[in-house]
Image (tube, grey):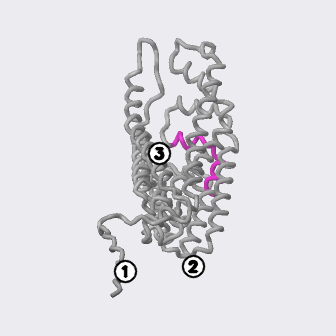
Amino acid sequence: MTQAPMQAPTPIVDAAAPVVLEMATPNRRVGLIVFGIIAIVLGGMALLGAVMVPIGAAMNVMMRNHATGYHPPPVDWRGIVVAVLMYLAVGAMLILTGIGSVKLRRWSRPIMLIIAWTWLLSGVAVMMVWAFMVRDMPDVMRHVMAQSNPNVSMDDVPQAAMILLVVVLTLFQVVLLVLVPGVLVWFYSLTNVRLTLEHYQPMPDWSDRTPTTVLGVSLGLALGAACLPFGLLYPAVPFFGVIATGWLAAGLWTLLAAALAVLAWGIYCQRAWAWWGTLLLSILGAASSIVTFSQVEFIEIYRVMGMDQSQLDMMRQYRALSGPMVNIVTGVMTLAWVVFMLAIRKQFGR
């Protein structure tokens, strides 16, 4: 009698054990964790900035010394409030998105790309302004130091030291405003990063309902609507050749905030009217600014906002602020924005 061959025992699988699937592309899990931690650290630094800003302002007040004649520029507490809220918002966004990246959540990639691209483009705009102003910075710094303390003259402040300081500040700006966000854009744009997140979270997330570019415009408009009410602290708006103040400026800020909120919702829903409204509002805003600052000195808006005369005098030492620099930067950034909006037009209905 022939004995039936013995079958191999069926392996027992623990249902609670995680199932690990092999990826067909390079796994970027470690990179997502590392860059997530970097984002968390950067967010922590932003939160630290929110603490240091009021401390620095308080120290500025305490450093006034009538005996020695040291008088630093007065503190604008409205600016302190806005700066603290900005640092808190940036810190919270970076920390939350960094945590999402560490936990391999699909939504972390589009949100980080939106943050990084906004950061990078804002940094490019800042560096454009910086390039116009950098030639006057050493002399302005020497003037401020001499003005703050009557016992110090401009000749006592070495020109070479101020030039070195400007070089260091420029390098710091390039790293912080261009290189860091540029690296974030590069990494989170990698196809393997997207595939890795889809591998570890196969089910679509809320961020997959709308293209990343559309989601970025929507969130940008929503953030603008949330921030514009703080413009009421500075009731001054450039409005086609004049600077609106008082209740007119407050009304314009309020209407603009409401318009941005409505457009943010329409853009998220990919409505054609929202695309046209956003494009038109952007062009009108740029035209209003260019027309105004072609007729009114740019520094005038800061005077209307209530800036101290000593700070206004310091700003006037920057020759670029009295020239066409503001309108050039506004025109370049608006042109880039219009090109971007035209590129995403196909993602909206008719």
Q: Secondary structure at mark 3?
A: helix
The answer to whether the residue labelled 3 contacts the one labelled 1, judged by CB atoms less than 8 Å apart, is no
Please state which of residues 259 and 127 is positioned toward the viewer in this rendering: 127
Position of the C terminus by quadrant = bottom right
Write down the quadrant of residue 82 in the picture. top left
Q: Is 103 placed left or right of 276 in the picture?
A: left
**Numbered tag placed on residue 38 in the rendering:** 3
The residue located at (64%, 48%) in the rendering is 293
Please state which of residues 231 and 37 is positioned toward the viewer in this rendering: 37
Q: Could you tell me residue 309's position as x and y percent?
A: 52, 31
Q: Main secondary structure of the magenta part?
A: helix
Q: Could you tell me residue 263's position as x and y percent?
A: 50, 68
Q: Could you tell me residue 116's position as x and y percent?
A: 54, 52
Q: Is residue 147 magenta?
A: no
Mark nearer the N terminus (3 vs 1): 1
Name the residue beneath numbered marker 2. 349
Name the residue beneath numbered marker 1. 5
The answer to whether the residue labelled 3 contacts the one labelled 2, judged by CB atoms less than 8 Å apart, is no
The residue located at (40%, 56%) in the rendering is 103
Task: Rate crowding at label 2 as few (under 14), some (14 to 19) or many (20 or more) other CA atoms within 10 Å.
Answer: few
